[in-house]
Image (cartoon, grey):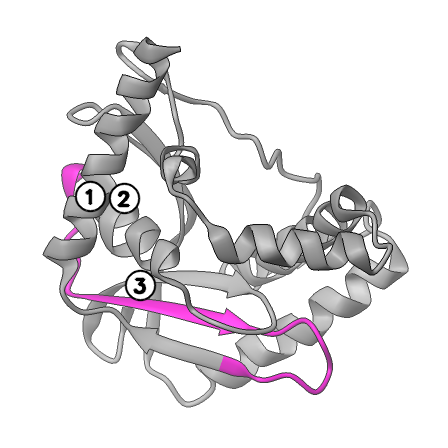
Amino acid sequence: MKNVTGKVNVHTVYMTKQGKVPSVTTVLGVLNKPALLRWANRLGMEGIDVTKYVDEKADIGQCCHYMIECDVKDKKPDLSIYSKFVIEKAENSFLKWLEWKDGKDIEFISSEMKLVSEKYQFGGTIDIYAKINGALTLLDIKTSESGIWPEMKFQTAGGYRLLLEENGYRVEKIIILRIGRDENSGYEEEAIENWQAYTKVFLLCRQLYDELKVAK
């Protein structure tokens, strides 16, 4: 197996013919997230450094995504740049990934695929595009302890699906897979329906993103 090295840049720059464009997650940053504010406030009340906590969780998610990418591509990961704590937590999530895919008929087509939309001027990275049990599937992986939230559906069924289809990839099914970071936490899978509604919300956010830039 080949060895893969390097820590990916979480702040990927997406470029269209018109220049630099926002990512799907940046576009959705215009949404008000009261639950996120309450969560950050709770951490602060408990004396936890929110920035350090978020950075640590980002490293765990990034490491797990990298391990999954290597698994999909049958390559050996180089985890030397990550701390022991991050690797242990990421491995917990990775084991749940292995458990989820066991017994499924999966033909992997691409992973960590970076795409841009010339039509709507945004970019994003697709976790996995594969034929799963016969259906061409957009699979988005979240490493968190609980919940598949609406903004995840706006991101996946809205932004990521638009990117795939504009670039010639047919989407027949969309799945969000949430895998926990702790040893005893499980995984949660949700097939997303009502794509048009989520797409409409995403495109409204894309328009609002530009309007807010002009207003500032």
Task: Give the crowd class for mark 1: few <14, some 14-19, many >=20 residues within 10 Å.
Answer: many
Which numbered disc flags the more N-terminal residue, 1 or 3? Answer: 3
Label 2 belongs to which residue? 159
> Left or right of 58: which side holds 197?
left
Vertical comparison of 36 with 27: above or below: below
Q: Which residues are magenta?
A: 165-187
Q: How many marks?
A: 3
Marks 1 and 3: which is nearer the front?
A: 1
Q: Are marks 1 and 2 in contact (CB under 8 Å)?
A: yes
Residue drawn 38% across the image and 35% down it:
30
The residue wearing badge 1 is: 162
Name the residue carrying label 3. Answer: 130
Quote the CA–CA distance across marks 1 and 3. Answer: 16 Å
Query: Within the image, what quadrant is residue 16 found in?
Result: top left
Q: Residue at x 58, y 79 (%)?
A: 96
Which kind of residue does numbered mark 3 sit on? Ala
Dot 2 falls on a residue whose secondary structure is helix
**Amino acid on which the number 1 mark rests in the picture:** Leu
Q: Are there few (<14), some (14-19), or many (20+) residues within 10 Å of tag 2?
A: many
Q: Position of residue 141 (x, y in %)?
A: 47, 62
Q: Earlier in the sequence, mark 3 or mark 2?
A: 3
Please say if 110 is above or below 46.
Answer: above
Mark 2 and mark 3 in contact (Cβ < 8 Å)?
A: no
- Residue 60 relative to residue 111: left or right: right
The amino acid type of the residue labelled 2 equals: Gly
Q: Can residue 91 be found in the magenta stretch?
A: no
* Placement of the C terminus among the 4 image quadrants: top left
Does the image show residue 86? Answer: yes
> Which of the two discs, 3 and 2, sits closer to the camera?
2
Q: Position of residue 61 (x, y in %)?
A: 63, 56
**The disc label shown at residue 33, or none:** none
Q: Is residue 28 above or below residue 38?
A: above
